[in-house]
Image: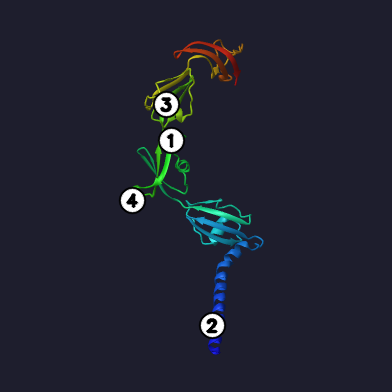
Amino acid sequence: MKNIARMKLRWLITGSMLLALAGLSVYTAIMPKARADERSLAVGEHIITVHDDGQSKGFITKKQTLREALAEAAIKLDRNDRTEPNIDERLVANSYNVNIYRARTVVVKDGSQLTKIITSYRTGKQIVKQAGIAVRDEDILTLSQSNSPMRDSAAEVLSIKRATPFNFDFYGKKTISYTQAKTVGEMLAEKHIKMSANDVIVPNKDTKISRGMNVRLYRNGTQTVTVDEDIQFETEQIKDVNRDKGYKEIQTKGVNGKRTVTYEINVQNGVEVSRREINSNII
């Protein structure tokens, strides 16, 4: 019985030692990477952590630029790919987090106009800027996965929903405005315009917005408006007895000036009945 007890004790000791060695091996296999990041860097060394399409990779380099460091780590970039920080940035800090944005084909749908572009950008405004397509703040840009990649020859589609242009008389200031609203009332809410008791909107708030329509917002009663006006230049004539009669020559071409004028006006039922200048300033 004593021999059997000694045998079991030896097995237990041997098993414990094997488990301890196995645990040490696992610890040793896991920890070196952590120690590589935490250890003191040698002069000229930099820790680079690259984030590339959801994958992360870390390495240490002595290269002087990000381009050289990525090449050393065998991380290839297409000419349309983009990095943050810039690919040619000089490495001076101890550590860097590098984002790689891989280029892909995006189809921009602007009404019936289709534009195909290879881009590494991730937002609609960045993509249309690269494509040279002008958009306004009121336009809606939607970037989504293509429903038919074979038809679009692209995995992503950027759709532009253009705002509707209309002529807006805003308390006497006339502009071409743009809106995504369906009615005049929704347009006022969209532009955060709050009407007072004396304000009148024409046509009424329930009117549907249409391309090129006229919308006027005015205030009944006495009010002030400020406008910019041209100042006509003066002509100075200089007589030269050495020239023939009737001879004329422009020495300096005149240029109109500008002034800002504030008027007190009286409006009744949408019609201005009086106007008085109360202040002016030459610009």
- Sequence-earlier tag: 2 or 4: 2
- Sequence-earlier tag: 4 or 1: 1
Mark 4 surroundings within 10 Å by alpha-carbon count, few (fewer than 14), some (14 through 19), many (20 or more):
few
Residue at the far front in the pictured view: 1
Amino acid type indicated by mark 1: Asp
- Asked if residue 182 is positioned above or below residue 99 in the image, the reply reads above
Mark 3 and mark 4 in contact? Answer it, CB < 8 Å: no
Determine if residue 13 is in view.
yes
Mark 2 and mark 1 in contact? Answer it, CB < 8 Å: no
Front position among marks 3 and 4: 3
Front position among marks 4 and 1: 1
Spatial CA span between label 4 and label 1: 28 Å
Instruction: Pick whichever, 87 or 263, lies toward us.
Output: 263
Residue under label 3, please give it: 185
Front position among marks 2 and 3: 2
Front position among marks 2 and 4: 2
Which colour scheme appears in the figure? rainbow
Residue under label 2, please give it: 11
Query: Residue 116, percent across and down?
Result: 39, 45
Disc ID at residue 156: none
Residue under label 4, please give it: 150
Query: Residue 18, percent across and down?
Result: 55, 78
Front position among marks 1 and 3: 3
